[in-house]
Each structure stands twice: as structure tokens, then as C-alpha cells.
Image: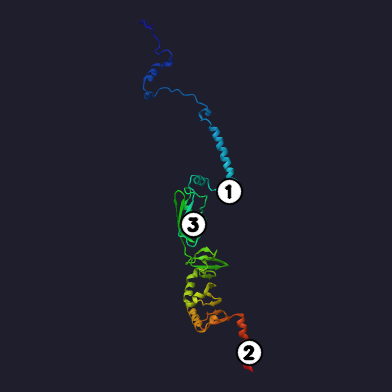
Amino acid sequence: MDGGGRNAGSLTPAGHPGGEGPRAGLLARLPRFLRRGAPRRLRPALPIAERMPRHVGVMAVSATFAALAMTGFVASGRYDAFVVEQGRPLDILARLAGFGVERVTISGISRMYEREVLAAAGIDWRSSVPFLDVTAVRERLIRVPLIASASVRKLYPNEIVINQVEREPAALWQRNGEISVIAADGTVIDTMRDDRYASLPLVVGDDANTRLSEYLGLVAAAGALGDRIRAGTYVSGRRWTLKLDGVDIRLPETGSAEALARLVRLERDARILEKDVIAVDLRMPDRVVVRLTEEAAAARAESQKKSKKGTAT
């Protein structure tokens, strides 16, 4: 007791050592957002195995084995073989859902066959409309020399529409035994695979394709003989030799049209091309040299011998 007969008890209530009791009680009565200084009770940490959802480990192991299996499947080449036989997995799913390519409409086709366009586009029964890359298809099509431009669009659920513009073939070009189809500017646009181009003019020799307009001008200058010209050979990059019904017409480097005009007059007046000749040389401006067949040359030589003997007697 103190001097006034009162007990000098501790200010700390029982059970709250250190003098924190009143403060703790005050904080307990305050709203939660004002309890900035309130001590927090920490929950004991759970083991990681207990914090993870159930079956996560099993799923992780399964995913790992699946990834390893897929890696081996791809690395072994079996995936590529599967795609070749059945198509890409996404295309397979789209086909099962009813979005397979069942119809391809092609417009602007002239010289090509439909199967050639489809092969160039990379479209077949394995394709699907949703996963067809129309940009890639268009790029593949315009890589075909015969196709000048192309557009590709989808019509859901099952159709692809292709609009193309083909280059116009102007002539055939033979070089080193191979025949190519060329446009008017000499660009090679196709190979000679069948008789669909058989009626086109034929030029032969190095750089003959780039001189096509010159050759066609000579054919036009030949007048009535133009229909009988079968081919033109560009010789040594300097001049033309025309193949006319089995007869070679050798033209000069310059003045080819004038030389052809002389031939037209000779044919009209003397029917020179109807005789047994295999070549007519027009390279000299003041004369025409004719080469006979072997039989005609032998007969002519024999005739000249007889003529000389008759003159000697």
C-alpha cells in the first residue's frame, strides 16, 4: 500500500506483460483499416506438396512423356510421312468439322490444265478452307512462268476460287535440243510438253528468243512465201537462215527484207523453189547462189559433161 492506504498495483493488466495491454485492447476496438500498428499473426507455411492442386504431378509427368514422344515422332520422319498421307493435323480436324476443300473454281485458264493449276497451288483433298493460306497459294501460282497474275479467295464452307491471267505464248524457241515456249518479249513461260503449242512459230539458236520480233517481221516481209516458212535459225548472233519447205534461205546481216523481196520475185518469175534445191544464198547483194540436192547436182554435172563433149566434136 502507498502512503494514502491504496495498493500500488501494476498498470499492466494480468496476462499482458510489458505494458502493452491497454494499447492492444485499444487497437482491438479500432476499425481494421486503422490498425496500422497491430501485430499480425503469421500462418505456418504449408509444404509445397500440400499447396499444389491434386494430380498436378501426374499431369506434369504425362505432359513430359507426351512431349518426348512427339519429339521422337517428328525426328524419326514419321510425322512428315503422316502429313503427306493424311494432311496437317489442323486440316484433318477442319475436314472432320465439314470444312474440307470440295470444290475449286478456276477462271482465266487458257493454256494450262486444271490439274496443273491445282498442283502449282498446292491444293488437294487434304486441304481445308479455314487453314488454307491464300497468300502462299497466290505466291506459288505466280511463280509459274505461264501465269502473269493470280488472286485466291475462300468461300465457306467448302470452296476456293482462283482467278488467274496467263501470259500469251508467242513462239517456240529451240536451243541445245530443248524447246521452250516464249512470250512476245522472249521470256520463257513454259516447256514444250505436248502438241498444244505445235502451231506457234519456231526460232532456233542462242539469243533467237530476244530477236523474235525481227523474225516475225521477216515472215511478214516474205509475202506469199511466209506461209511456207517453218522456222528461223539465228546464226552466230548476226543473221537469219529461214527454213522454207526443206530449203534453207540464207539471209544477209543487213538488208534481210530486201533480200527476201528478191527471192519473192525469183519465185514468181522462175519458180526457183520448185526445183531440186536445198539452199538459196542471198547474202551477196548482186547475185543468188543456189545449192542443189546431191542427185540434182550429179545430174547437172553429167549434163554439163555431155554438153562439153558435144561441143568438142
Quadrant (top left, top right, bottom left, bottom right) of the C terminus: bottom right
User: Which amino acid does the dot numbered 1 rest on?
Assistant: Ala
Q: CA distance from mark 3 to mark 1?
A: 25 Å
- The numbered mark at residue 306 is 2
* Mark 1 crowdedness (10 Å alpha carbons): few <14, some 14-19, many ≥20: few
* Mark 2 crowdedness (10 Å alpha carbons): few <14, some 14-19, many ≥20: few
Q: Residue furthest bottom?
A: 313
* Mark 3 crowdedness (10 Å alpha carbons): few <14, some 14-19, many ≥20: many
Judging by the rendered image, the residue that carries numbered circle 1 is 81
Judging by the rendered image, the residue that carries numbered circle 3 is 141
User: Which amino acid does the dot numbered 3 rest on?
Assistant: Leu
- The numbered mark at residue 290 is none
Q: CA distance from mark 2 to mark 3?
A: 71 Å
Residue 238 visible in the current orientation: no
> Which type of secondary structure does the marked residue at label 1 adopt?
helix
Instruction: Tell me residue 63's x, y (percent).
Output: 55, 37
> Which type of secondary structure does the marked residue at label 3 adopt?
helix
Q: CA distance from mark 2 to mark 1?
A: 82 Å
Task: Tell me if label 3 and label 1 are in contact, CB under 8 Å.
Answer: no
Q: Upstream in the sequence, badge 2 or badge 3?
A: 3
User: Which amino acid does the dot numbered 2 rest on?
Assistant: Lys
Q: Is residue 307 above or below residue 214?
A: below
Quadrant (top left, top right, bottom left, bottom right) of the N terminus: top left
The residue shown at (52%, 66%) is: 197
